[in-house]
């Protein structure tokens, strides 16, 4: 997430992967009490106490925490105490995480997990997995984070584990919120909140509310975020927990900064800083100072802002807090830029990039490269400026892909929310029906009492009730069938919508945006580029236009195929279909000096929709051209296999990694990579090939040897008893071509 909002990664602290070993964050007095016990504890239990002290010091004094963890590790190894050895590794890994040294923490956490599994120590395993999940969450590897959290939950089965389960549920909720699955995130937050409220743990309730507020903050609902931050802050003040107040105070400052109310933001950052001073907590101090500095820069109070940023820099350096330094140098670059000190600004942006690369802070890298590209261009070094701008564009596109995935997930989440609302409406209707049935039972009871008096009236009423019930049941069955049909239609429409959004949202924008940027440079600054570079740019523009045209053609064909139009299959010459597409593709293979040949010796007639199979062959040839290097070779061959004819397109290109083969035909993923000349695809072509081949009664398959080439093959049903020469003559005269209108 962007710098600013502090999240409780576990029950304990914000921004740090403290494991589940402690149930609450100790204060200074409690830590001193633990240290005093060292003089009287037995040698056997000393490593355990050293680990406890290390965890207690994590958020008070990182150096002391590291020192005690190292003592615990040395003693545990000496005494061959594997459990405390593993716990010491987790303590040291947590300490490195707190200081922002993420690369150093990972092997320690993995070692702790390994020892836990060797000992089958459930507590050590779950602590290590929870910490690993928090690490992967921090660096943006959400898949590994999810796997770690879910594996931890498999070890927590007992009702006594409800607090640990609620802790991991809260971490999972933060993960789902970051990845855009808001419905799942809120469900897990509320489940954890319910457990802590039942336990009467006000402190844990406040922490969950802070995390809920962060989720609302990420979603852009600043009013709700502010409400939950204030509720968490009120609880901590009621409990007189000064150390915990700093987190919501900082987050409220972020709210006001996002609103542009910088003076209010400075007030809350100052309170966070003040708590850090009182508790001698350098992280709270430095985060508060950094926030004040950023707000002052926004107010154009550059000198005051610089003083705060430099103060934060000194504290971050003393802590070796890499993430903080990445943001400090970016702000120093902004200050130097505002003062027209270009050389200093560029140096600061370069340092920020170095730190941000270590932690994969994508949004900060994007801002640094954009600023650096602009400053380098001013110096006249247009080539380097262009390279920096390309790096910025690549990062921006990557960030856009993430936001696109978030958007699609958000749409899916909203759809699921609507489904749940529909389920509630159905349950409400079912309850109404049950109430109606109860009413009918009361009527029947009264009728039974009246049997003694009027038997004839009773018989008539029974007949009437039976008829009414039958009609109601028939009506209810009819309504349920309609609801199920509507549900299926909505699911299909939602799937189609997601697929279209995932293509249109970025790929068209990327190609057109790149073309626009190149044309702007050619028109506005033609003298910057020598004639040979202008020719290269023109060729690149032509390639981009070809890619855009191919994408539009595939997208239009796929969209029309989804509308359920009829397929018109007729007997067609497979050799003629292949030869015509080879001639169309030869222009592109000649540009890369690729040898494109057909080895189809027999002319077999197959039943197919000609336009669909033309699209299949064209896409497969285009794919082979993209991934075959200069002076490569593409061969088309085929043979009859029973009642089918198999066509194969083989290249000696880069090949496909084994783990990606299952992804290329997955309509949920639109998997794509760059070609040998950086050709960009949409991921739609192969999905289109699979759908069209299967709609024509065939199958498509792929075989690949990484680094040696790939062969795509598909089958079509042989048209028996049809003369190929007569069919070709009819097709040339305009006969036997119903396929021309199948998808056009």
Image: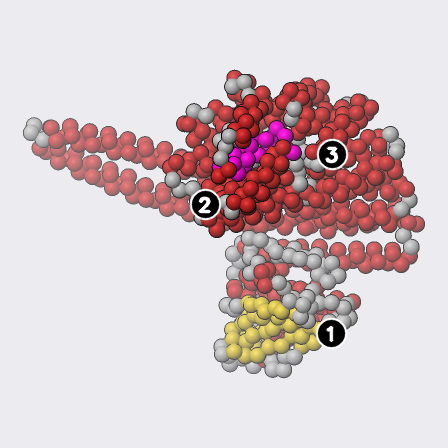
Furthest toward the left, the residue is 452
Q: How far across and down, in percent of the image, does residue 189 sit?
A: 49, 33
Crowding at dot 3, Cα within 10 Å, few <14 / some 14-19 / many 20+, comes out as few
Which one is earlier in the sequence, the residue at label 1 or at label 3? Answer: 3
User: Element under label 2?
Assistant: loop
| Residue nearer the viewer, 268 or 608 | 268
Q: Which residues are magenta?
A: 45-63
Viewer-nearest of labels 1 and 3?
3
Q: Secondary structure at mark 3?
A: helix
Asked if one can make out residue 494 in the rendered structure from this viewpoint, the answer is no
Q: x and y percent of residue 161 in the render? A: 42, 37
Task: For the residues labelled 1 and 3, say whether their Cβ atoms are less than 8 Å apart.
Answer: no
Label 1: how many Cα within 10 Å (few below 14, some 14–19, many 20+): some
- Residue at horizontal 13 percent and vertical 36 percent from the top: 459
Which mark is drawn over residue 121?
Answer: 2
Q: Which mark is residue 595?
A: 1
Query: Mark 3 = which residue?
Result: 317
Mark 2 against mark 1, which lies toward the viewer?
Answer: 2
């Amino acid at each position: 997430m962007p710098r600013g909002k502090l999240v409780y990664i576990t029950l304990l602290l914000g921004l740090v992967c403290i494991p589940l070993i402690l149930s609450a964050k100790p204060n200074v007095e409690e830590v001193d009490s633990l240290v005093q016990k060292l003089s009287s504890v037995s040698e056997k239990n000393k490593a355990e106490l050293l680990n406890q002290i290390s965890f207690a010091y994590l958020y008070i004094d990182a150096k002391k925490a590291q020192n005690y963890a190292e003592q615990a590790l040395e003693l545990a190894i000496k005494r061959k105490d594997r459990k405390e050895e593993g716990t010491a590794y987790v303590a040291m890994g947590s300490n490195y995480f707190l200081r922002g040294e993420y690369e150093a923490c990972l092997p320690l956490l993995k070692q702790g997990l390994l020892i836990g599994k060797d000992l089958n120590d459930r507590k050590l395993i779950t602590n290590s997995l929870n910490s690993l999940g928090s690490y992967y969450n921090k660096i943006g590897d959400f898949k590994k984070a999810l796997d770690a959290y879910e594996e931890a939950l498999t070890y927590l089965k007992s009702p006594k584990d409800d607090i640990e389960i609620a802790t991991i549920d809260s971490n999972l909720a933060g993960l789902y919120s970051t990845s855009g699955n808001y419905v799942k995130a809120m469900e897990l937050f509320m489940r954890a909140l319910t457990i802590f409220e039942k336990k009467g743990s006000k402190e844990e309730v406040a922490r969950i509310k802070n995390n809920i507020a962060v989720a609302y903050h990420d979603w852009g609902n600043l009013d709700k975020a502010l409400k939950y931050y204030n509720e968490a802050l009120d609880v901590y003040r009621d409990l007189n927990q000064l150390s915990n107040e700093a987190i919501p105070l900082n987050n409220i400052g972020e709210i006001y900064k996002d609103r542009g109310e910088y003076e209010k933001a400075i007030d809350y950052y100052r309170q966070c800083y003040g708590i850090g001073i009182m508790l001698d907590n350098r992280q709270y101090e430095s985060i508060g100072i950094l926030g004040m500095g950023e707000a002052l820069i926004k107010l154009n109070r550059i000198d005051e802002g610089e003083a705060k940023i430099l103060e934060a820099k000194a504290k971050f350096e003393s802590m070796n807090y890499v993430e903080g330094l990445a943001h400090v140098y970016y702000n120093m670059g902004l200050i130097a830029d505002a003062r027209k000190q270009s050389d200093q600004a560029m140096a600061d942006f370069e340092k920020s990039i170095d730190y941000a690369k270590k932690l994969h802070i994508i949004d900060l890298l994007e801002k640094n490269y954009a600023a650096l590209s602009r400053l380098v261009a001013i110096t006249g070094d247009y080539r380097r400026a262009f390279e920096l701008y390309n790096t910025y564009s690549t990062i921006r596109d990557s960030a856009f892909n993430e936001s696109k995935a978030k958007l699609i997930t958000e749409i899916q989440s909203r759809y699921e929310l609507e489904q749940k609302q529909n389920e509630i409406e159905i349950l409400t209707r079912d309850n109404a029906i049950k109430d109606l049935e109860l009413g009918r039972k009361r009527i029947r009871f009264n009728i039974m009492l009246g049997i003694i008096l009027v038997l004839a009236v009773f018989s008539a009423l029974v007949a009437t009730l039976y008829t009414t019930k039958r009609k109601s049941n028939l009506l209810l069955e009819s309504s349920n069938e309609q609801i199920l049909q509507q549900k299926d239609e909505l699911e299909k429409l939602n799937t189609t919508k997601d697929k279209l959004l995932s293509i249109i949202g970025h790929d068209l924008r990327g190609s057109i945006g790149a073309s626009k940027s190149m044309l702007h440079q050619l028109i506005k600054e033609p003298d910057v580029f020598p004639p040979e570079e202008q020719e290269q740019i023109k060729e690149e523009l032509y390639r981009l236009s070809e890619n855009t045209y191919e994408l539009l053609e595939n997208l239009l064909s796929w969209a029309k195929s989804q509308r359920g139009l009829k397929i018109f299959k007729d007997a067609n010459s497979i050799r003629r279909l292949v030869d015509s597409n080879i001639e169309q593709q030869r222009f592109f293979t000649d540009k890369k000096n690729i040898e494109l040949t057909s080895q189809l010796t027999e002319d077999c007639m197959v039943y197919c929709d000609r336009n669909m199979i033309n699209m299949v062959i064209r896409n497969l040839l285009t794919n082979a051209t993209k991934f075959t290097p200069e002076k490569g070779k593409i061969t088309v061959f085929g043979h009859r296999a029973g009642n089918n004819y198999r066509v194969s397109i083989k290249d000696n290109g880069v090949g496909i990694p084994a783990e990606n083969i299952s992804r290329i035909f997955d309509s949920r993923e639109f998997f794509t990579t760059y070609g040998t000349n950086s050709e960009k695809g949409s991921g739609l072509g192969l999905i289109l090939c699979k759908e069209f081949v299967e709609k024509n009664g065939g199958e498509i398959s792929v075989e690949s040897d990484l680094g040696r080439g790939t062969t795509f093959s598909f089958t079509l049903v042989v048209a028996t008893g049809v003369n190929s020469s007569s069919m070709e003559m009819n097709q040339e005269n305009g006969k036997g071509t119903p396929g021309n209108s199948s998808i056009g």
